[in-house]
Image (spheres, grey):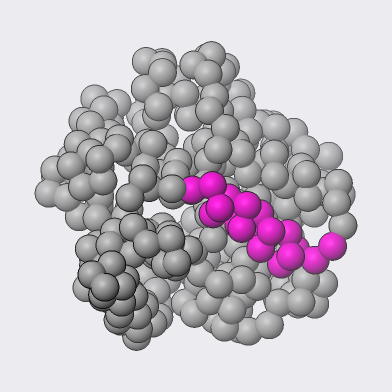
Amino acid sequence: MAAACDLLEAELALDRLEAALAAELPGHLRAFAAAHAAGSPPPPAPPSARRLAAVQHALAHPVLADRALALARLVFPIAIDDDRRVVAASAVTRTWDAWEALAAARDAAARERFGIGFIALMHRLYGVERARGPEPVPWPAPLAGWHDAAASLEIDAAWRELAARHGARGTLQLVHAEVRARTFVVEPRQHVIVVAPTVTSLATKFAVLHELGHALVGLLVPAGVPRVVDEAAASYIARGLERDHELGVCARQRRLQLAMALDVVERGLSTARPTEYPPWALWHDPGAQAAYVEAEAIADRWCSESGPLGGAITRERARIDATTSFGQ
């Protein structure tokens, strides 16, 4: 009887959390998208996204694990970012020494809150399955012509074609701003915002197509998709660039080499410092490099298969979720 009561309590807490997030997240993500477009700091995460206990309690119950895992992918990284040591370490000038201090702060926070190191935690949340060795990876040289003024893209038309081909319904709201392209899933399967710069080069064309891939994921499947699957879909869609531009293949190979090199660095398996300052990704998107590497392998496989993208995403997610455990 006690076990049944515990399960009921965990389920009710999860219900309340999901309801609170459904009420708070859309407004937060609209504000986040507006801030990103304006080049302003993001708003703080909503209060409901800080309810760790409900998610951790639900993870202990197999019948709630799928729902809890989807929420863990949202709230666990927020808990790390909220840690006072991480806040302090991220508020300094970006240098390699400062990055090492920031990585140590993230690791300490993860071990205290979740019992495992930060990189291991992020890999588990992101769906990274393949352990890679410590072999060094050469830092890739710049790709000539990739950033030259040589391309354009009618984004609305490209989106209509992609949505029709993959059966995406719901609304994509396009916001033009000369910032890093980014996607915000306001309401899964209903409303997505893509902030995108003007397409003037192959690099910006790739970036926008990549974000349209993320938008498809947001409108095709429920929230909580593992990062490796989300990035695989974005890569799969962005590979459309390669049909018309031979540099696209070279750029993809360079991105993969870059992700492999950064993965070795952020896992602490190399002390190499290949750039004057730590790259943006290590500072602002930690633990993601292995996900990018694995995503390319998934996208390679999808390119050899046929069928709707939504089905491929769903199957890949189910496979990863079935093998993801937090040892509760």
Predominant secondary structure, magenta span: helix
Front in this rendered view, residue 83 or 94: 83
User: What residue is at 69 percent from the left and 59 percent from the top?
Assistant: 315
Q: Is residue 81 above or below residue 212?
A: above
Q: Position of residue 116 (x, y in %)?
A: 29, 37
Which residue is painted at 41% across and 16% down in the image?
270
User: Magenta includes 113?
Assistant: no
Where, by quadrant of the figure, is residue 12 drawn?
bottom left
Q: How many marks?
A: 0
142 lies left or right of 22: right
- On whether residue 310 falls in the magenta region, the answer is yes
Which sits in the foreground, 94 or 67? 67
The residue that appears at 41% across and 40% down in the rendered structure is 287
In this rendering, would 328 be left or right of 221?
left
- Residue 192 in picture, x, y percent from top left: 54, 76
In the figure, is residue 299 to the left or right of 185? Answer: right
Position of residue 321 measured from the top left corner of the image (x, y, whole percent): 54, 54
Q: Kindly indicate the quadrant of the structure image that contains residue 56.
A: bottom left
The reply, left or right, for residue 282 in relation to residue 159 is: left
**Does any portion of residue 182 appear in the rendered image?**
yes
As drawn, 82 above or below 301: below
Q: Can you say which quadrant of the picture contains the N terminus?
A: bottom left
Residue sitting at the far front: 1
In front of the other: 62 or 71: 62
Report the magenta residues as a range: 307-324
Residue 93 at least partly seen: no
Q: Residue at x 61, y 71 (%)?
A: 221
Residue 280 location (% of width, % of height) = 40, 41
